[in-house]
Image (cartoon, rainbow, N blue to C red):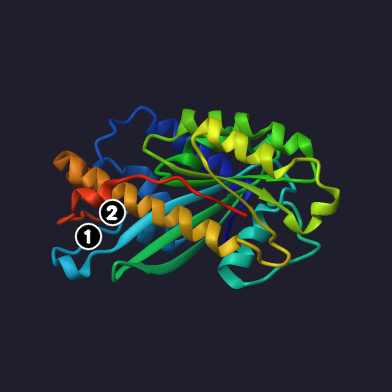
Amino acid sequence: MCSVTEEMMKEIERIGEIESNDPVDGTNIGEKFVWEKKIEGDVIDVFFKMDSSDEEGEEYLFKVVIIGDSAVGKSNLLSRYSRNEFNLHSKATIGVEFQTQTMEFDGKEVKAQIWDTAGQERFRAVTSAYYRGTLGALIVYDITRRTTFDSVTRWLQELKTHSDTTVAKMLVGNKKDLANIRNVSVEEGAKLAEEEGLFFTETSALDSTNVNKAFEFVIGEIYNNVRRKVLNSDSYKTDLSANGRVSLVNITADETKKTSCCFR
């Protein structure tokens, strides 16, 4: 897992301000590209690697963020999914950490770069850069702490404000293993998800319940969203290619139907 320190977070904020004045045309990567190269080469692979001209060599590169209040279990969800590890004494995330996962959809290789950010207020200033290019999000709350559930609408508004694409969103009630002391019912979580148009599940990073399902469902939904948009817009196909994401072809109308999901 790669991490970004507080000093780097300040630079992210500065770059985010620079980028906010740039045209959003998929071509101006400028200083951000150079700076991310200095931090970690893998970031370039995810955000700026161009597609192969050979269709069989195409790569699918998706950015997913995990958001929610501090101590809801975001880091342990990511470590459980990416490394099948759980740290009972996990410390609060400082800045941003990310992990890249690879999987297959329809015989194609898909890479998801999953970002875990600090939930503390002192890191809120970097939101614009953190959300840039996001295609999927897990909004996490702790089922034993109602205040974290009450914060979900704020996190959703922040996501809506700073993301500039259609985002596949799943509401995640974490710490399902502590159901005996829960303060948020399953029904409340499902109701909020329905009202906000989110997918919904409850998870336990401790015992792995629904963790893989949650991440893989969101990544799969991103894949489907890309397929639908490419089907409906040639210009979107061009934009994806310019931004280092893949174009898809030969999609039937039946494959564009959207479904909802709730698993527990």
Instruction: State the residue position of label 2.
Output: 245
Q: Are marks 2 and 1 in contact (CB under 8 Å)?
A: yes
Q: Position of residue 78 (x, y in %)?
A: 60, 60
Instruction: State the residue position of label 1.
Output: 51
Q: Which mark is residue 97?
A: none
Mark 2 residue type: Arg
Q: Position of residue 201 (x, y in %)?
A: 60, 50
Q: Residues within 10 Å of mark 1 (few under 14, many from 20)?
A: many
Q: Residues within 10 Å of mark 2 (few under 14, many from 20)?
A: many
Where residue 195 sits, quadrant-wise, is top right
Q: Position of residue 257 (x, y in %)?
A: 30, 46
Which quadrant is the C terminus positioned in?
bottom right
Q: Position of residue 50 (x, y in %)?
A: 24, 58
Check disc 2 and report its element: helix, strand or loop. Answer: loop
Check disc 1 and report its element: helix, strand or loop. Answer: loop
Which mark sits nearer the N-terminus, 2 or 1?
1
- Kindly identify the residue that appears in the image at 26 percent across and 46 percent down: 228
Q: In the rendered view, does 254 fall on the left or right side of 180?
A: left
Where residue 62 sits, quadrant-wise, is bottom left
Residue 94 appearing in the image: no
In this view, the residue in front, 185 or 4, is 185
